[in-house]
Amino acid sequence: MASKGALKKKKALERRLKKHPLKISTITDLGEYLQEFLLRGVYIFSLKQGQNAIKTITASIHALLQDKQYNKIAAILGINKIPREQAQILVYQAMASPDPKKADILIKQALRLDSKNVDALAWQAKQILSTNPDHADMALNAMREITSFAEAQLGPQLDILNGKIHEFPLARPYLRSLYTLFSSLDRCELHEEALNVGKKILTLCGPDIFAIRDRMTTLQNPVQPLIAAPSQPNSATKSATITSPTTNEDENYGGQLNEHQAIVFAEICNKTDAFCQAHVDARIARYARRAAFQLCREDDMGAQRGKRESWASGIIYALAQANDLFAPDAHPAIQPVTIHTFFKISSSTTSKKSALLRKRLKISPDNPDWICHGHPTP
């Protein structure tokens, strides 16, 4: 139980937050961006006080973290009165907020403090693209200008930190702007330019940015839909089988499908392939094909009954849950409504099929057989 003194300090902090809602002391909900806030603050501190001073301040930061007194951390690091850093903290809050309206307010507050904040400008351009598709050209031009501006801000440090620039906290907004541009170009089907931006990100960060690398692979080698088997097989083809139904001829899922199973399999895969081509990537498409193969091989699962769209939606939903694709920072990231809308299947039907597939095929985040590794954002 907290001491009376600690409770008294907590109440005093809460009172200050209510009186001064826009000051640096409002950084209580940074979530995953707290670490970047600390790295950024310590780096700025080291520029002023020298590297040797970092050791002496580490213990103080640790104690303040325990009490969640982030305002004091900002003060001892000397960033509590720097408008640029105040703006960046507001941006961290916006990026961590689940409320779009609140996030938009925070972004506007950040830009009032620092009109050249790269994260805030990129956020606004992305919002324009999301809410006004007719203004896509304007949004993309804004993103291009923002990345060029951010690159100019970093100057010669880019060459020094080439290959490991993601380790430099002040460069992360620039990387996020590149990532936003890459995703937006991909969304607008400007694939050639998207590939060039992706190559730049990999050059700056190294090849371990799996989400970018895998998406580039998909852009260069798009998933080809399977050719559906004939709807009325004749007696001469009853023994036909499909053992390697992917774009990779060396890959197979084990076992064989009879002719009827093969027809159902091809029809389901054509639908999951189409979704993956439009909304995710080739990795998810391959896992979807594997799930469809196992589904069709097990007669008691009922793949031959019901709409193919319902099974396809269940497969995609199960894989999206296992791979955390519903998280806002995932790449690719999708929403459940995207699945229902694409397949024109109700959410309840999708959930039922997904639950059955998760149970029978053991599709879960704990089963590495169904996990596409590497969905981080820079």
Image (cartoon, helix red, strand yellow):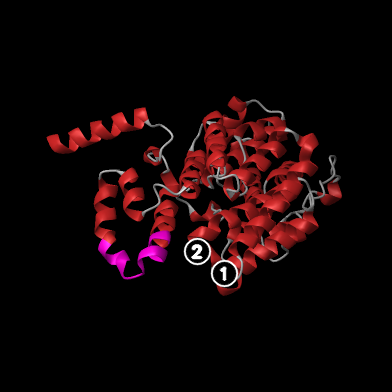
Q: Earlier in the sequence, mark 2 or mark 1?
A: 1
From the viewer's perspective, is residue 306 above or below residue 217? above
Q: Please give the residue where the numbered disc 2 appears in the rendered image.
A: 168
What whole-number distance in Å separates the C-alpha atoms at marks 2 and 1?
10 Å
Residue at 72% over, 34% down: 342
Task: Give the left or right position of residue 235, taking residue 295 as reference.
Answer: right
Disc 1: CA contacts within 10 A as few (<14), some (14-19) or many (>=20): some
Residue at 63% over, 45% down: 121
Image quadrant occupied by the N terminus: top left
Residue at 36% over, 69% down: 50
Q: Are marks 2 and 1 in contact (CB under 8 Å)?
A: yes
From this viewpoint, is residue 291 visible? yes
From the viewer's perspective, is residue 313 above or below residue 178? above
Residue ranking furthest to the left: 4
Task: Give the left or right position of residue 148, taking residue 301 as reference.
Answer: right
Q: Position of residue 353 (x, y in %)?
A: 59, 33
Identify the magenta region: 44-56
Image quadrant occupied by the C terminus: bottom right
From the viewer's perspective, is residue 11 above or below residue 362? above
Residue at 59% over, 71% down: 162
Q: Amino acid at mark 1?
A: Gln
Secondary structure type for disc 1: helix
Residue nearest the observer in this picture, 117 or 377: 117
In the picture, the disc for residue 157 is 1
Q: Answer whether residue 130 is magenta in the image.
A: no
Q: Position of residue 176 (x, y in %)?
A: 59, 53
Residue nearest the observer in this picture, 373 or 131: 131
Q: Position of residue 39 (x, y in %)?
A: 41, 58
From this viewpoint, is residue 255 visible? no
Q: Name the magenta segment's main secondary structure.
A: helix
Q: Answer whether residue 48 is magenta in the image.
A: yes
